[in-house]
Image: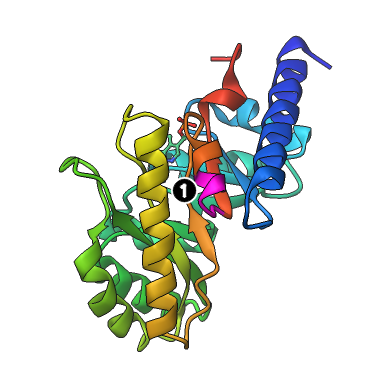
Amino acid sequence: MTDSARLVQNNWNCVQEAVQAAADGSHWKQEVQVIGVSKYVDAPQTNLLVQAGCQELGENRPQFLWEKFDWFAQEQSTQPQWHMIGHLQRNKVRRTLPMLKMIHSVDSLRLAKTLEDEAAKIKRRIAILAEVNVTQDNSKTGMPESELSPFLEQIADMPHLELRGLMAMSTHFAGGDQARTEFARVRELRDRLQAAFPQFDLRELSMGMSGDFREAILEGATLVRIGSSLWEGIR
Ligand SMILES: *Cc1c(COP(=O)(O)O)cnc(C)c1O
């Protein structure tokens, strides 16, 4: 093993342990999956994380995803499972969609319609999460809470989209207590939507990053998107 491989392996083990400890300490007893966010590093470095055992990867920019997808197609016998976690422009949907297992960041009805059309063309269903903005911070992406019900009504008529839950971020640098309050709001919103739309199975809550995944797990996160902590000492 190279030094870099050893570092990434160690970071991965530490993150897995911390996530498991938080899950064991939470009231929800849910299984929590780590999405390794690889946006900070290149494809060979990303592969160190895959080799360390992380099979689910997240990218926030389509171009970065394309580059890495091509690298894995050429250099490795298998692809990791790719998650889109950042804003996806509609003109990039056609190229990006076939590479993805899940899109966490569906933030408008227009994007959902484009995804539905392209998924229909390639005859597959795509798992999505609705991104909601529960912060006071205007710069953050995601739909306001009030848009979620009308959004779900429309999604119900899009057979190629499989809505699995919600994704959210907490206010940047707000600190643990505020993050917990915001994550709790996401869970409560999900519970209300689940009651109103029994045709969906809204089991997933994608919330929590390196700085606040413990708070997110305590409030019911099932998917945590972790980047920085996995690349300590590497980048
Ligand atoms: C970069 C990013 C993450 C990971 O953040 P870290 O603080 O580096 O763990 C999670 N979610 C989204 C949407 C991101 O863009």
Seen from this angle, which residue lies furthest right?
Answer: 1
**Does 222 sit left or right of 187 as displayed?**
right
Q: Quadrant of residue 16?
A: top right
**Does 161 sit left or right of 151 as displayed?**
right
Q: Quadrant of residue 14?
A: top right
| Three-letter code, disc 1 | Met
User: Residue drawn at (27%, 77%), measured in percent from left and top?
Assistant: 149
User: Residue drawn at (65%, 40%), measured in percent from left and top?
Assistant: 22
Q: Residues within 10 Å of mark 1 (few under 14, many from 20)?
A: many
Q: Nearer the viewer, residue 132 or 29?
A: 29
Residue that mark 1 sits on: 207
User: Residue drawn at (73%, 49%), measured in percent from left and top?
Assistant: 78
Image quarter in which the N terminus is found = top right
User: Residue drawn at (39%, 35%), measured in percent from left and top?
Assistant: 177
What residue span does the magenta drawing correspond to? 216-221
Q: Nearer the viewer, residue 212 or 154?
A: 212
Q: Position of residue 109 (x, y in %)?
A: 24, 71
SS assignment at label 1: loop
Q: Position of residue 160 (x, y in %)?
A: 45, 81
The reply to whether residue 71 is in sight is yes
Question: Is 97 covered by the magenta stretch?
Answer: no
